Image: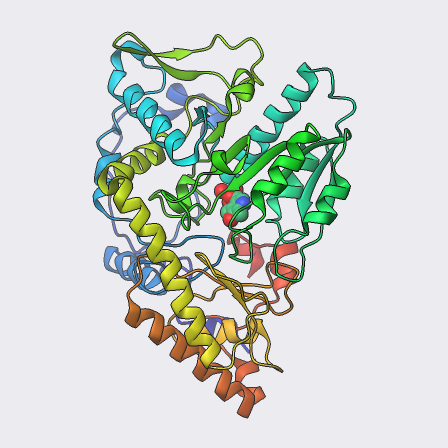
Amino acid sequence: MDRREDRAFPLIFERSQKGRRGVRPPSVGDVDPEALFGRENVRESPPRLPEVDELSVVRHYTLLSRRQIGVDTSFYPLGSCTMKYNPRVLEAAAARFTALHPYQDPETAQGALELMYELAEYLKAITGMDEMTLQPAAGAHGELTGILVIRAYHEDRGEGDRRRVVLVPDSAHGSNPATASMAGFEVREVPSGPDGEVDTEALKRELGPHVAAIMLTNPNTLGLFEKRILELTEAAHQAGVQLYYDGANLNAIMGWVRPGDMGFDVVHLNLHKTFATPHGGGGPGSGPVGVKAHLAPYLPVPLVRKRGSAYVLDEDLPKSIGRVRSFYGNFGVLVRAYAYIRLLGLFGLKRAAALSVLNARYLKALLKAKGFRVPYDGPTMHEFVAQPPEGLRALDLAKALLDAGFHPPTIYFPLIVKEAMMIEPTETEAKETLERFAEALGEAARKGLANPGWLEGTPYTTPVRRLDEVRANRRPVLRWTPEAE
Ligand SMILES: *Cc1c(COP(=O)(O)O)cnc(C)c1O
């Protein structure tokens, strides 16, 4: 079958008609491009651009934008991603700073530095940490920064050669073991117990003078709060082991409990999940890292500090691991987080967290009533991991949801649950939306059980149907070239 005939949207190149124009740029007059740019920089033949009229361009991109599924168009319950709605007013706040330049003299950017200083103070208060860097550009980048800080700490104490192991639970986000191994550590997996929480005894057996750190997230990847956390962190500290808290998903606990009070030494946050920057699409993000006082000397430079009434960039940290990013982090993301925290206040943050938990518990109850199973069914926090009714595949149900106008949940993660569907509704969705979603998923499951062929054929309404996902990953074709035709 000719895919092009089949496709609702031809590429803009395929709309091209020889000689058609949408715009006529002004003539360059008698400027000599070769003299201006140098002969080697001037092209010999015109670029192969599509020749289209203005209306065709407008329609093309407008129709494409209407094929998007995003938070602005529909429910997006992608677990471990916190795809919540972010108020537009925060975009306006970020846009106020676009005239700043990173090479500006700090004396002329006092407002920006004040904002960074105060944001760090808020995040310290929310996490229970003593010092905070805003430099890392993403969650995984924050992890790497935090683990390098821990490594520097052990090295400084003369234990760097001995402490070579990082412990990670089997339910962990994939970035945790990846981070530890990138920082040169050996990763050892700790099993979860039957209740979905870390197996405390197994973890204690692994502790010792060869262990540098444990990376945990709480609530964990099954959406469950680790109730034995104080016992765990205390045992780890007795063995000289540092506790790393993956705080990418702080939505469930912000304002209620603090990683610092649970005994953690390092925490990273994903401002582009919890604090008002949309997550997805490849950035920009921000993964601030907070540490307890004993790790502060190793943080990246510079840190924003207050000297009298002035804000300064402090480069004077002799034991610092150095810079982890150019300039000062993704500043626009910091502005949104600052404005969001100011907008909500502590009471608002607590309420957002409580509603995210309430929504997850409500949706879990709705899906259980429709025959979905929840293997680790403890007190759910901001997300839960469900399994389809016996005989159905998570992938097929995810595809069916596309036809119903919903973004699918995260599937096949965490790895310890077969046919996992990891669902995170967030606090910003209305009760009716959750009900419509449960209805759609229940209906897909019901029809799939009655007629497996129908379910395996979904989606029916998208421009392309089922992709060869392995090939799309291994050999992504991201650019159109005429030769590819
Ligand atoms: C999203 C996430 C990360 C990684 O964050 P990025 O910004 O995508 O690098 C790490 N840990 C957990 C638990 C996450 O959900």
Residue at 74%, 48% (x, y): give it: 202
State the colouring used for the structure image: rainbow
In the image, residue 163 lies at what x, y percent?
75, 27
Q: Is residue 145 visible?
A: yes
Quarter occupied by the C terminus:
bottom right
Q: Residue furthest bottom?
A: 450
Rendered position, 387 above or below 36: below
Residue at 31%, 56% (x, y): give it: 52
Rendered position, 411 above or below 187: below
In the image, residue 41 lies at what x, y percent?
47, 27
Q: How many marks?
A: 0
Query: Viewed as shown, does residue 474 lie left or right of 29?
Result: right
Between residue 174 and residue 170, name the one nearer to us: 170
Quarter occupied by the N terminus:
bottom right
Between residue 166 and residue 421, name the one nearer to us: 166
Query: Viewed as shown, does residue 59 lie left or right of 414?
Result: left
In the image, residue 168 lies at what x, y percent?
67, 44
Residue at 62%, 56% (x, y): give it: 473
Query: Viewed as shown, does residue 72 lie left or right of 298?
Result: left
Q: Quadrant of residue 37?
A: top left
Q: Is residue 9 visible?
A: no
Between residue 42 and residue 277, name the one nearer to us: 277
In the image, residue 263 lies at what x, y percent?
54, 34
